[in-house]
Image (cartoon, rainbow, N blue to C red):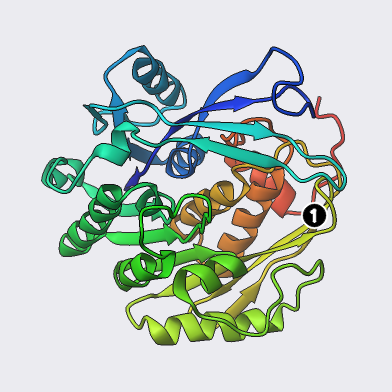
């Protein structure tokens, strides 16, 4: 099965260790972005995956493509255009100091792209599963229109659409609220991925869940999922991640899945020494797409996704550099971290 993901990939500049921005004169340069992160996960699991974006026609764009190819991600559907490569700066939090992201992505190549710029017939050739997030339509008005065009084009071709709602308050700056756009996009989504804040801010669907609390009542998420599925009858299922944030270093991590008939809850992992949590949600989405297409049982698919994301918290960089066997080992109960030799 061929999967296509679509969105913006950026240059990621991270301070060394736990330094603040410009505390020293060095930064670690890598690439990252929601949909690209999902593509890398799927390629690592052996799936046939293509990534679509618009990159500047310069050396940065060239190096980005080389990096994706290194993981086995198909890059033949990437367009080159006017504009620049977006950048994000990352400070790694510790203890009570949260991680901090600063975006510098205005006038990026994909922010300038508009409906009609991409040939969806060619891009969707042989594709059976399409993944997008709520980040891409937040970048600019034209990127929002392009995102809506993409999900409509996918549904016209009978392609399964997954969407990570991914609410980013610092991006919605061009005059539309997230909910105005995402409630329309959700009509074309088969599989939704979200956390509790994404559902509340992107779809304006709420229950009495406190997104700031450390402890999460899982049963309330059944009601939240039921509300979403009732609002969007074409949606087949929604997965909601459950993060209990005790500090920047210590999170409880689990998820639930609601398909309108059954409600599944994963085991919970206590992650007490987080190395890098950026990309954690993307690694969950990638794990879920793999799990739903590889296992008969939705519970097993959910456990794979949560275990994959748990492992990502121990890996520096946006990309989740793990294999199926790594994830299945943890999902099967081997979480001791003993040296493998």
Residue 260 in view here: no
Residue drawn where x is 36% and y is 43% of the image: 7
Dividing the image into 4 quarters, which one contains the C terminus?
Answer: top right
- Quadrant in which residue 332 is drawn: bottom right
Q: Is residue 121 left or right of residue 46?
A: left
Q: Is residue 291 left or right of residue 76?
A: right
Residue at x 59%, y 65% (from the top left corner): 195
The number of discs equals 1
Identify the residue at horizontal 76%, vertical 29% (top origin).
20
Horizontal and vertical percent for residue 285?
A: 52, 53
Q: From this view, report whether residue 304 is shown above or below residue 257.
A: above
The residue identified by callout 1 is 251
Q: Is residue 106 above or below residue 225?
A: above
* Label 1 packing within 10 angstroms: few (<14), some (14-19), many (20+): many
Q: Where's residue 334, x and y in %? A: 80, 48
* Vertical order, 78 against 212 (above or below): above
Secondary element type, mark 1? strand
In the drawing, does residue 122 fall left or right of residue 142? left
Quadrant for residue 253, please give it.
Answer: bottom right
Q: Residue at x 40, y 75 (%)?
A: 236
Q: Position of residue 154 (x, y in %)?
A: 22, 58
Q: Is residue 121 visible?
A: yes
Given residues 147 and 258, the one toward you in this image is 147
Residue 250: x and y, percent?
Answer: 84, 50
Q: Nearer the viewer, residue 62 or 329?
A: 62
Please tell me which residue lies in front, 7 or 212: 212
């Amino acid at each position: 099965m061929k999967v296509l993901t679509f969105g913006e990939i950026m240059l990621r500049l991270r301070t060394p260790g736990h330094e603040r921005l410009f505390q020293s004169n060095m930064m670690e340069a890598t690439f990252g972005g929601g949909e690209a992160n999902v593509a890398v996960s799927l390629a690592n699991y052996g799936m046939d995956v293509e990534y679509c974006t618009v990159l500047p026609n310069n050396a940065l764009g060239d190096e980005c493509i080389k990096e994706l190819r290194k993981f086995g991600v198909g890059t033949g559907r990437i367009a080159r255009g006017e504009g620049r490569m977006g950048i994000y700066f990352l400070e790694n939090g510790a203890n009570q100091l949260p991680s901090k992201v600063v975006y510098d992505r205005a006038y990026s190549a994909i922010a300038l792209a508009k409906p009609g710029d991409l040939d969806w017939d060619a891009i969707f050739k042989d594709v059976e599963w399409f993944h997008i997030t709520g980040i891409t339509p937040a970048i600019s008005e034209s990127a929002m229109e392009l995102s809506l065009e993409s999900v409509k084009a996918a549904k016209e071709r009978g392609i399964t659409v997954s969407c990570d709602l991914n609410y980013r308050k610092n991006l919605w700056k061009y005059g539309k609220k997230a909910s105005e756009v995402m409630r329309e996009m959700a009509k074309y989504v088969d599989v939704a991925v979200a956390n509790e804040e994404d559902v509340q801010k992107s779809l304006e669907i709420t229950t009495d869940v406190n997104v700031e609390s450390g402890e999460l009542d899982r049963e309330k998420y059944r009601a939240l999922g039921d509300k979403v599925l009732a609002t969007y009858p074409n949606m087949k299922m929604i997965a909601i991640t459950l993060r209990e944030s005790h500090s920047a270093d210590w999170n409880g991590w689990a998820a639930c899945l609601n398909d309108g008939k059954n409600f599944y809850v994963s085991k919970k992992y206590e992650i007490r020494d987080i190395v890098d949590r950026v990309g954690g949600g993307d690694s969950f989405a990638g794990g879920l797409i793999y799990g739903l297409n590889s296992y008969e049982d939705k519970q097993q698919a959910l456990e794979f996704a949560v275990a994959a994301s748990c492992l990502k918290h121990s890996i520096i960089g946006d990309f989740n550099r793990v294999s199926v066997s790594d994830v299945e080992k943890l999902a099967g109960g081997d979480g001791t971290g003993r040296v493998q030799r």
